[in-house]
Image (cartoon, helix red, strand yellow):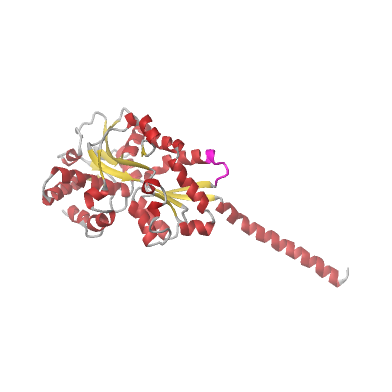
């Protein structure tokens, strides 16, 4: 074979080999682009396993949904440190706010992009007690009685824990006239904590499996789920007459989704949470929902409760974080012996 012909054949072969190699390298990236990563809070594992199944059934051509779970604030930190989440489904507004203000991952007006301030469902704080309610727990004040041991996640690392702390503060504000009396109640309340786990699921494990404490304080949705899973005859749910509105903000992270080309898919995934089938699924999992038709269907499942907002109790999330949960804030001061 002449030299020029042999060289031509070798050149064609090398080009084909190079093209094959490039395609092989590109395939994982294409596959990755067909996945959405939802970074969510600690106790939402079962909820989003069910929601994702519903969503993928109704949207067979949608990307596969992957989940990441931890305490809401820990998730925000992980994202700031490089976790490439497409969407977040958190249990506290400030954990999304920091992704906007510090991480520049989404616009400052992110709450205006979806209905109800980007909170498609909500809950409140409730108590799970052991069979027969032996310590006679009915309201927040009972949690500070002598001999009562309580379990809830650390407000420093958990949005769930912050809602519990603020629920207790809201009760104190309604019950005691002076700030000194309110702080005295909070100090006593915190002194009854048996263990501060980093997230809601850890607190559940401490209460249910390790048998620590007389009362688990967590979201209403979680206490009902625990009772279903571990035995309705072994636990009772107590919803105090006054509690706190716990919102569950959702958002897509523009910087990440634009880089991956997943923005439309991320939006569609979150928008479907507002649909009637999704709202019904949420209600079945003991979350309070926005859809009026679904609300009416499940009204007997949710006791009437006076819900105070974070703004009612502490002015704003920004103010609450600074005054109560920052290093050296009121939480730290009240825990000093």
Determine the residue positioned at 17% across, 38% down.
142
- Residue 135 place in picture, x, y as percent: 19, 33
* Front-lying residue, 87 or 208: 87
Where, by quadrant of the figure, is residue 210 drawn?
Answer: top left
Q: How many marks?
A: 0
Where, by quadrant of the figure, is residue 273 drawn?
Answer: top left
- Residue 137 place in picture, x, y as percent: 20, 35
- Name the residue at the bottom extreme: 3
User: In the drawing, does residue 106 fall left or right of residue 165?
Assistant: right
The quarter of the image holding the N terminus is: bottom right
Q: Is residue 197 above or below residue 226?
A: below
User: In the drawing, does residue 114 fall left or right of residue 168?
Assistant: right
Residue 21 visible in the snapshot: yes
Is residue 88 covered in magenta? Answer: no
* Front-lying residue, 29 or 14: 29
Magenta residues span 56-62
Residue 196 visible in the snapshot: no
- Residue 253 place in picture, x, y as percent: 45, 55
């Amino acid at each position: 074979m002449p030299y020029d012909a042999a060289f031509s054949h070798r050149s064609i072969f090398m080009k084909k080999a190079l093209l094959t190699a490039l395609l092989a390298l590109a395939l994982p990236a294409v596959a990755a682009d067909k996945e959405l990563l939802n970074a969510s809070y600690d106790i939402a594992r079962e909820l989003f396993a069910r929601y994702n199944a519903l969503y993928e059934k109704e949207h067979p051509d949608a990307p596969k949904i992957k989940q990441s779970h931890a305490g809401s604030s820990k998730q925000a930190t992980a994202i700031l440190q490089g976790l490439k989440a497409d969407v977040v489904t958190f249990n506290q507004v400030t954990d999304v706010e920091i992704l906007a203000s510090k991480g520049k991952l989404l616009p400052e007006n992110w709450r205006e992009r979806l209905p109800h301030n980007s909170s498609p469902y909500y809950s409140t704080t409730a108590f799970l007690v052991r069979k027969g309610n032996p310590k006679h727990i009915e309201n927040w004040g009972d949690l500070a009685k002598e001999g009562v041991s309580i379990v809830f996640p650390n407000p420093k690392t958990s949005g769930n824990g912050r809602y519990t702390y603020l629920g207790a503060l809201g009760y104190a504000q309604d019950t005691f006239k002076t700030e000194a009396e309110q702080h005295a109640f909070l100090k006593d309340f915190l002194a009854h904590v048996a263990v501060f786990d980093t997230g809601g699921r850890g607190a559940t494990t401490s209460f249910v499996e390790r048998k620590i404490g007389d009362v688990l304080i967590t979201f209403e949705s979680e206490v009902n789920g625990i009772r279903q899973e571990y035995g309705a005859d072994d636990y009772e749910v107590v919803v105090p007459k006054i509690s706190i509105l716990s919102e569950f903000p959702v958002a897509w992270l523009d910087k990440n989704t634009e880089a991956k080309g997943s923005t439309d898919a991320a939006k569609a995934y979150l928008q479907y949470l507002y649909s009637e089938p999704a709202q019904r699924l949420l209600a079945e999992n003991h979350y309070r929902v926005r859809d009026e038709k679904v609300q009416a269907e499940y009204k007997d499942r949710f006791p009437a409760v006076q819900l105070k907002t974070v703004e009612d109790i502490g002015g704003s999330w920004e103010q609450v974080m600074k005054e109560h949960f920052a290093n050296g804030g009121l939480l730290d001061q009240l825990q000093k012996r």
